[in-house]
Image (cartoon, rainbow, N blue to C red):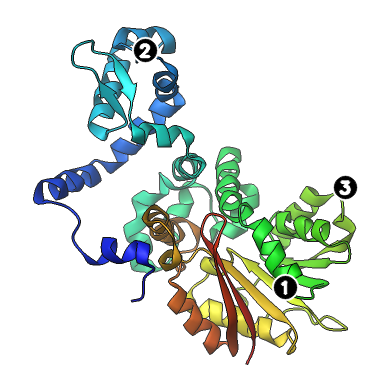
Amino acid sequence: MNLFPALESRYTKEQLSAREAQRQAEFIAWGPIVFQATRLMLKFGILEMLRDSEDGLTEAEVVEKTGLTRYAVKCLLEASLSIGTVLIDPESDRYTISKTGWFLLNDPATKVNIDFNHDVNYQGFFHLEEALKEGRPAGLKCLGDWPTLYEGLSSFPEQAKESWLNFDHFYSDSSFPEALRIVFAEHFVRSLYDVGGNTGKWALQCVAYDENAEVTILDLPQQIKMMQENIAGKPGAERIKGFGINLLDKEASFPRREGGLDAIWMSQFLDCFSEEEIVSILTRAKEAMDQDTRLFIMELFWDRQRFEPAAFCLTMTSLYFTAIANGNSKMYHSDDMRRLIRQAGLEIESIHDGLGQGHSIMVCKKL
């Protein structure tokens, strides 16, 4: 397995002493409680109070500022000492925020991940074992009765939908400026299919970037409806069309565009499908292409990350796909995607790494 240098030593050599490893094992064993205690330290504003205090706060001062009982504050602060998000001065008994606590407050990715895991994943992950054994999203029933998350997204409970969209958009949106340059500045693109276009955010950026660009979003009919509502009245919306399609249907063909098609865009899309499904989708995409069409696949490949925490988040996200989303997809290693692209009769022309939060774009053409 080929890994980027940032991951090589971490994933191939033991990093911890025996005592550190034992501590890590207990941290994992108590992980659900660590998560909820920390989430409430954020929700109740305690970490923020500690960050903003000049000399830290006593237990009594936290009680006064939060309105919580002394018992609740004591339990949370003592747990947070062990978790490592706060520190205490042994002489004054004043609590201060640690570096880890600071990141919990100030790293936008961490905030998005906490909300996503609490509002979308937490209850459903009780059913991860079923999902792994049966190949279906067994935990999705905690949100609603749908075969996969994608059929139900537009009907999600409001808080879960908001956290899901924030999670999805946070990772893709930061890559859009660089991605637009790659798609439009390095290639002649006037007609583009946005496959799995969701709310139309990328399509709106495309028509704003190039006044001659026309975008057709291919997605489930219910997603097309949500997209149309989202783009209504916005600049360039008249150059965005929708095409309802169930891409899991192997007989569902991509529309043929009269006059040819310049580009097909798939952003954080193929990770929503199994390997077999990816080959099917790419094969049907190829049928809508000619020799001048380019297929742009933008994904977060866990092996191509600059920093190890990003790879950690991505491999954990694979289990979200298992338990909640569809039961059979994941965040892929780039070598696996190369293999699937080749199986579909396409080849990679170039790869652009390090976009936004760690995206890569594989630019593909017909063999």
**Front one among 204 and 163:** 204
Question: For residue 203, which quarter of the picture?
Answer: bottom right
Q: Which residue does the numbered mark 2 point to in the structure image?
A: 62
Q: Which of labels 1 and 3 is toward the front?
A: 1
Q: Which residue does the numbered mark 3 point to in the structure image?
A: 233
In this view, 3 is above or below 366: above
Instruction: Assign a secondary structure to mark 2.
Output: helix
**Front one among 121 and 138:** 121
Q: Which of labels 2 and 1 is toward the front?
A: 1
Residue 314 image position (x, y, % from top left) = 43, 58
Q: CA distance from mark 3 to mark 2?
A: 48 Å
Instruction: Assign a secondary structure to mark 3.
Output: loop
Q: CA distance from mark 2 to mark 1?
A: 55 Å
> Callout 2: 10 Å neighbours few (<14), some, many (20+)?
many
**Do the residues bearing badges 2 and 1 touch, measured as CB atoms within 8 Å?**
no
Q: Which of labels 3 and 2 is toward the front?
A: 2
Q: What quarter of the picture does the N terminus occupy?
A: bottom left
Q: Which residue is located at x 46 percent, y 74 percent?
A: 334
- The disc labelled 1 sits on which kind of residue? Glu
Nearer-N-terminus badge (3/2):
2
- The disc labelled 3 sits on which kind of residue? Gly
> Callout 1: 10 Å neighbours few (<14), some, many (20+)?
few
Q: Which residue is located at x 43 percent, y 64 percent?
A: 302
